[in-house]
């Protein structure tokens, strides 16, 4: 009878077969050159009152905690793009 192999035989076969060799670890990253590192302290943000459309606020708040940081990131990206235009 050539039916399915009983679970016990499957487990025994899995247990007795050789497992492939453990792959070699990835190569180490190149050393960090700290001599050229520059420490920059973030500037404190300024609190303002800003009026935005309700849909804009709802959109950012719906993405969860940190919505004000995301609004700031969008404004910063726009500012930097405008600066690059000259």
Image (tube, helix red, strand yellow):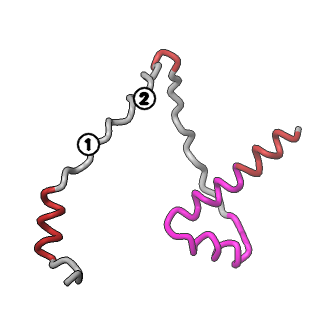
Q: How many marks?
A: 2
Mark 2 element type: loop
Left or right position of 33 against 63 = left
Q: What label does residue 21 carry, if any? A: 1
How packed mark 1 is, by other alpha carbons closer than 10 Å (few <14, some 14-19, many 20 or more), is few
With respect to residue 38, does 58 lie above or below?
below
Mark pair 2, 1: CA separation: 23 Å
Left or right position of 46 against 5 = right
* Contact between labelled residues 1 and 2, with CB atoms less than 8 Å apart: no
Residue 12 picture location, percent across and down: 11, 65
Residue 32 picture location, percent across and down: 44, 23
Left or right position of 15 against 74 = left
Q: Which residues are magenta?
A: 50-76
**Which quadrant does the N terminus fall into?**
bottom left
* Residue at 64% over, 53% down: 73
* Residue at 57% over, 57% down: 69
Q: Quadrant of residue 10?
A: bottom left
Query: Is 55 covered by the magenta stretch?
Result: yes
**Which quadrant does the C terminus fall into?**
top right
Question: In this view of the protein, which residue sits in the foreground, 27 or 44?
Answer: 27
Residue 64 picture location, percent across and down: 51, 70
Residue 37 picture location, percent across and down: 51, 22
Question: In this view of the protein, which residue sits in the foreground, 19 or 69?
Answer: 19
With respect to residue 77, does 34 lie above or below?
above
* Residue at 64% over, 60% down: 71
Q: What label does residue 29 carry, if any? A: 2
Q: What label does residue 78 carry, if any? A: none
How packed mark 2 is, by other alpha carbons closer than 10 Å (few <14, some 14-19, many 20 or more), is few
């Amino acid at each position: 009878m050539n039916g399915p192999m009983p679970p016990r035989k499957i487990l025994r076969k899995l247990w007795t077969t050789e497992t492939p060799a453990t792959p070699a670890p990835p190569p180490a990253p190149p050393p960090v050159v700290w001599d050229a590192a520059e420490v920059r302290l973030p500037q404190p943000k300024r609190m303002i009152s800003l009026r935005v459309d309700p849909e804009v606020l709802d959109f950012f708040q719906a993405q969860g905690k940190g919505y004000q940081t995301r609004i700031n990131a969008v404004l910063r990206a726009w500012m930097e793009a405008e600066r690059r235009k000259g």
